Image (cartoon, rainbow, N blue to C red):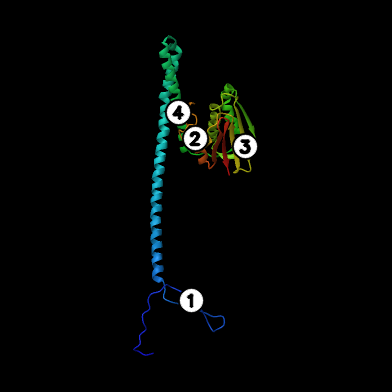
Amino acid sequence: MNANIRPSTAPETDFRVSLLKSDAKGERLIMLTHDQLRVTAESLRQMNDLRSKLNDELRSAKEANLKLQETLLSMEAFAHAASHDLRTPISTLNGALHYFSQHYAAGLPETAQEFLKHMSRATSQMDRLTTELLEHSVSTSARINIQDISIQDAVSEACAGLAQELQACGGQISVSGSGFRLHADPTLLHLVLTNLLTNAIKYRHPGRPLEIKISQSSAGRDNWELSVSDNGTGFDPKDKFLILQPFHRAHREIEGSGIGLSTCAEICRRHNWQFTADADQGKGAIFTIACS
C-alpha cells in the first residue's frame, strides 16, 4: 500500500450486522460495520433514567399511601368514638322525652303535644343514625375474625332476630337451596344479613304482603352465592351502584340514613366477596353476595 494514500474517514452509520457466505463449507462470516453504539448507549441511559424516575415515583406513592392509610384510620377512629359518645346523650334525651310524654303530655296544649312528638321523632332518628354510623365504622375498621361458619345457622339467627318485626308487618321468609359453609367474621356477616332483611321490611310494598326469599347455592368452599330478594317497592335500576354509597337513599319519603347498604358493601369488600344490587321498580329488589 502506498504510504501517501490515507483511507478517507467514513461518516458514522447505523450499526449493522451482515451475515456473509464463506467458501468453507458450514462456515458463516459476520461483518460488523460501524456500530450504532452511541445510539444504543443513549437508549440504555434513558432507560436507566426512566427506571430511576419510576422507582422514585413508586417510593413516593408508597409513602403517600401510608399517610393516606394513617389518615383513614384516624378518621375511622374519630367516627367510631364520635358515634359511640353521641349515643349516651341522645339516649338520655330520648328517655327523658318519653318519660315526659307519658306523664305530662296529657296536660299540654295540642300544639305543645305536636312539638313533643316532633322532638321524640327527631331524637329517635338521631339515635338510629349514630347506631348505623357506629356499625359502619366497625365494618371499615374492626379487625376481621375469620371463622368457619354454617350459612344456614347465620341465616336462621338473622331471621330469628327480626321475628317480631316480620310478625308485625305480616311478612314471610322462605329459604331455598342447599346450605354450605364459608369463611367469614360471624359478627359482620350477621350485620350484613340483618341490614338486608331490615331493608326488605322497611321498603315493603303497601299493597301486598311482604315476601322475602333467601336463596343459597354452592360449588365449593370458595365458590358460593347467597341472594336476598323481596317483593317490595324496589328502586330505579339505574341507581343500583349509587345506593351502595354512604348516605344515598333511593326513597326519600321513607325515613332512613342511607348507610346500611354501604355498610354491607364495605363488609363484603373486606371479605373479598362481590356484592351487587338490582331491582324492578315497584316490584322488588334483589341483593346478591358471591364468592368465586
Mark closer to the chain start, 3 or 2:
3
Q: In which quarter of the image is the N terminus?
A: bottom left
Tally of numbered tags? 4
Q: Mark 2 points at which residue?
A: 243
Q: What residue type is labelled 3?
A: Gln
Mark closer to the chain start, 4 or 1:
1
Q: Which amino acid does label 1 sit on?
A: Ser
Q: What element carries label 2?
A: helix
From the image, state whether disc 2 or disc 4 is nearer to you.
2
- Mark 3 residue crowding within 10 angstroms, few (<14) / some (14–19) / many (20+): many
Image position, residue 147 (x, y; %):
56, 39
**Residue 222 against residue 260 in the figure, above or below:** below
Q: Of residues 196 and 178, which is closer to you in this image?
A: 196
From the image, state whether disc 4 or disc 1 is nearer to you.
1
Mark closer to the chain start, 2 or 1:
1
Alpha carbon distance from label 1 to label 3: 69 Å
Q: Name the residue under label 1.
A: 18
At a point 46% along the width and 13% down the height, the residue shown is: 102
* Image marks 2 and 4: residues in contact by CB distance under 8 Å: no
Q: Residue 190 carries which label?
A: none
Q: Is mark 3 on a helix, strand or loop?
A: strand
Q: Residue 216 carries which label?
A: 3
Q: What element carries label 1?
A: strand
Image position, residue 186 (x, y; %):
55, 35
Q: In which quarter of the image is the C terminus?
A: top right
